[in-house]
Amino acid sequence: GVVEFRSRNGKEINIADPMFGLYFIEMANNDNVVFDGELLCQDEHGNNLDRKTGNGILNKAVKGTQSVEEGETVGAVLWDLIPLTDFEARISRTTYQERLKDLLSRTNPKRLTDKRVTVVQSFTVNNIDEVNGHFNRYLADGLEGVILKSKTMIWEDKRSKHQVKFKAELECDLEVIEWQEGTGKNKGKLGALLCKSADGKVQVGVGTGFTDADRKNIGPDVVGSIVAVKYNARINDKRSNVDSLFLPVFVELRSDKDEADSSDVIK
């Protein structure tokens, strides 16, 4: 009868819509369980909002400032179900095939009529070609990719060797327009680089991918240089004419280039 929403690192997520928790109470059916999945935000037609807008609404839930109207946009895509005792023990030896079957039975349309809570789409595959076929189809639909899972996979509270994430990794060359100092152990060293495309239509802060030597040796004189940046997707910001990149990672200084990529070639 009690529902808690928590992030991966344990922070409580306060969904302002009181109705949302009732769906999970219904699915739990008096069992003490943990539903594993992803919170997404949807428009009035049930379509997922873009990542930046949705994350903004969910960040308000973490801060406790989410409105009821915003809470009503929150939905969930689930992919696992772990008994609470196993979750607290940090291991469940029930196979993924069995856990998924249990999850599907609890989200059967006859029991759960609200489309705000769904189970991730799954397929059985027999070889790597079939995996790549599904992966490429999802990419073509504008989604991130797929996760290949063993049916006999147990659940553990750590990175599993029995599931593999397939994601597109794109790369582009950007101009550094600002050097930002780090904090903590990186005080006085490089913290992040603000970068942009040649036409300024893509701009992003890059704060990961640097080695300790990079943070020590890359100084403010890097401004104006070209750097290679790896990323997962281009993020459109409807409120401005400047886009960003999802999960940008520094790759290298491109001393062989003196011009950044135009936004036309950054997908």
Image (cartoon, rainbow, N blue to C red):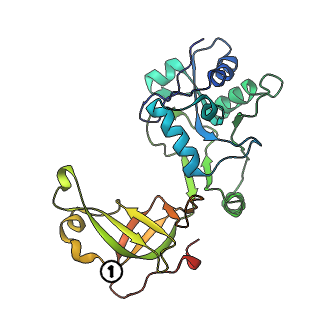
| Residue carrying label 1 | 225
Q: Nearer the viewer, residue 22 or 122?
A: 22
Q: Is residue 243 left or right of residue 69?
A: left
Q: Where is residue 27 in the image (x, y as percent from the top left)?
A: 69, 21
Q: In this view, does 47 lie to the left or right of 248?
A: right
| Above-or-below relation of 260 to 72 | below
Amino acid carrying label 1: it is Ser
At horizontal 42% and vertical 86% (from top left) the residue drawn is 259
Specify whether residue 47 is in view.
yes
Q: Which residue lies furthest to the right in this view?
A: 110
At horizontal 81% and vertical 28% (from top left) the residue drawn is 109
Specify whether residue 156 is in view.
no
Q: How many labels does the image show?
A: 1
At horizontal 61% and vertical 50% (from top left) the residue drawn is 148
| Above-or-below relation of 124 to 92 | below
Q: Position of residue 197 (x, y in %)?
A: 47, 76
Q: Where is residue 172 in the image (x, y as percent from the top left)?
A: 48, 75
Instruction: Give SS at disc 1.
Output: loop
Q: In which quarter of the image is residue 40?
A: top right
